[in-house]
Image (spheres, rainbow, N blue to C red):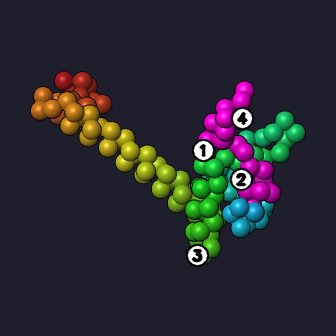
Amino acid sequence: MTADDSFGRLDDDYPAYTMGRAAEMLGTTQGFLRAIGEARLITPLRSAGGHRRYSRYQLRIAARARELVDHGTPIEAACRIVILEDQLEEAQRINAEYRRAIHSAGPSLTGEDLHPFKRLRG
């Protein structure tokens, strides 16, 4: 593996940050990271020695939760809000893909053709 190859591993999902470094980057405590882990907002990977490791994606999620908590939202509610925001974003992404598929297929394909229960309705 070359040095250039190793940088490719540092994508958004690569668990590159220790708990201490993650807390420092977020300007929060390690206890906060443990709390959002207990609330199942994020699940850090564990190193061979059992130490938590966080990805950039997880740090973005934690930062959003911290923002809500800093504005007075209880941590459990903040975690639920972040989960719902993430689910909404994913649903919007899927909806946009369906719209692109309909548009690229032209007038012969409609939204009804993509409906998952169309075959069940007869």
- Is the residue under label 1 in contact with that under label 2 (CB below 8 Å)? no
Query: 10 Å neighbourhood of mark 4: few (<14), some, or many (≥20)?
Result: few
Which region shows up in magenta?
1-23
Instruction: Indicate the secondary structure of the residue bearing disc 2.
Output: helix
Q: Which mark is residue 38?
A: 2
The picture quadrant where one finds residue 25 is bottom right
Q: Position of residue 81 (x, y in %)?
A: 52, 60
Query: Is 111 placed left or right of 9 in the picture?
Result: left
Rendered location of residue 67, percent (x, y): 59, 68
Disc sitting over residue 12 in the figure: 1
Q: Eyeballing the image, is 17 above or below 77?
A: above
**The disc labelled 4 sits on which kind of residue?**
Ala
According to the picture, the residue beneath numbered tag 4 turns out to be 3
36 or 94: nearer the eye? 94
User: Of the residues under marks 3 and 2, which one precedes in the sequence?
Assistant: 2
Which one is earlier in the sequence, the residue at label 4 or at label 1? 4
Residue count near mark 1 (Cα–Cα under 10 Å), binned few <14, some 14–19, many ≥20: some
